Amino acid sequence: MSVTAPAGFVAAGVTAGLKKSGGLDLAIVANRGPLANAATVFTSNRCKANPIIWSQQVMADGRVSAIVLNSGGANCYTGTIGFQTTHATAEAVAEQLDVSAGDVLVCSTGLIGEQLDLVKLTAGVFDAGLALKDDDAASAAAGLAAAQAIMTTDTRPKQATQVSPAGWTIGGMAKGAGMLAPGLATMLVVITTDAVLSSAQLDTALREATRVTFDRLDSDGCMSTNDTVSLLASGASGVDADPDEFAGALTALCRDLTLQLQGDAEGASHDVAIIVRNAAAETEAVTVARAVSRSNLFKAAIYGNDPNWGRVLAAVGTISEADAAFDPYGIDVAINGIQVCTAGEPDEPRELVDLTPRAVSVVIDLHAGTAGATIWTNDLTHDYVEENSAYSS
């Protein structure tokens, strides 16, 4: 189970007719616990979709009773009618659940600039409302259906759970396969917990978890307009969670979902971890790793099973001295355990590097300090180009 694993939450995923494929395309996650505390992190893209604009207003008081999510259309750059559609969707959910529309988050994912059919949306909300049941036997299936309903180019649903010995649980679901870059990604993530925590405590934990997980997934360097990561707390366990323990479990769950997103990235044939060690500061390690993750030359080489470490150093060299301290001729590089470069010179023969496995690690040692960071990315393939040249929701 995922979002339905913590006590106090129910979910549903239904077919509203928004997807051309006719698959599941609308999900609701409802909080029926004694608390309705929440925290949310949104995309940093200035071109925000209507659901983001609405949901930012909802989050003003840190209270959320439900979240409705649709695939089959992003409802972004759809004018005033698009915002009205978002508002009407929240109203429909509120009516079904007998809550305030101002406590309903709305998320949409799909093609930008495509208007959503409000009739189909509200009919889907009605069907989802009927499907919400407080039945333990059906909760796992309901959580899975919700995870499937938010998929776009994903090939599989993403779910994760963390259970604390203290008696509380965290569950999560995610979608995203392309436009995966910092400032989140083209991802929708819903995380639930039955722990007793304030909205402020949830916000602190979520921002730190996001900073070292979702924000470090940089699959293709493209940032979405609709990214939302939400954390809802029902308090149904009755257990006051230790904030530090909760933050650790939340980060572990977010990392699990991050790696699931990486593993399902559009067209990818390699999952690449770019690990920077001994940087002067963590931010500098992130900058270096991200520069490599953004290099199409490097990503194309990985696709071709070519351990071209020169492309790694060339990408690192694009960073200014103000952004990262290092000696360009004092860097070590290892690829899948083979030390191909030491102090800026060739070391072991690159022919020893085996890039046939899907998992690839690139370790860059800057010898400039003691800080480190990892960025997760993918290779650049023909399939990625083909999929994004003809994408429609």
Image (cartoon, grey):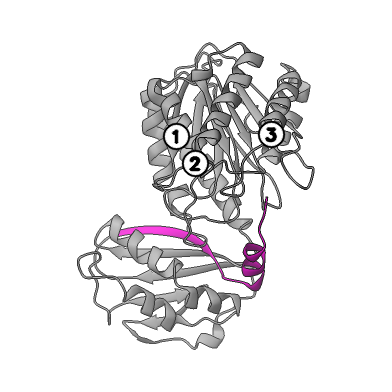
Secondary structure under tag 3 reads strand
| Residue lying at the far left of the rendered structure | 322
Q: Which residue is mark 2?
A: 49
Q: Amino acid at mark 3?
A: Leu
In space, the residues marked 2 and 3 are separated at their CA atoms by 17 Å
* Residue depth check, mark 2 versus mark 3: number of the one nearer the observer: 2
Please, what is the three-letter code of the amino acid marked with disc 1? Ile
Foreground residue, 375 or 85? 85
Q: Is residue 123 visible?
A: yes
Q: Quadrant of residue 257?
A: top right
Q: Disc 3 or 1, which lies upstream in sequence?
A: 3
- Determine the image quadrant of residue 190: top right
Q: Position of residue 188 (x, y in %)?
A: 56, 41
The residue carrying pointer 3 sits among few (fewer than 14), some (14 to 19) or many (20 or more) residues within 10 Å by Cα, namely many
For badge 2, the amino acid type reads: Ala
Q: Magenta span covers which residues?
A: 371-393
**Residues marked 1 and 2 touching at CB (< 8 Å):** yes
Which residue is the site of mark 1?
A: 53
Q: Look at the picture and state if 337 lies above or below 110.
A: below
Q: Residue at x 72, y 21 (%)?
A: 126
Residue 124, quarter of the rendered image: top right
Earlier-in-chain disc, 2 versus 3: 3
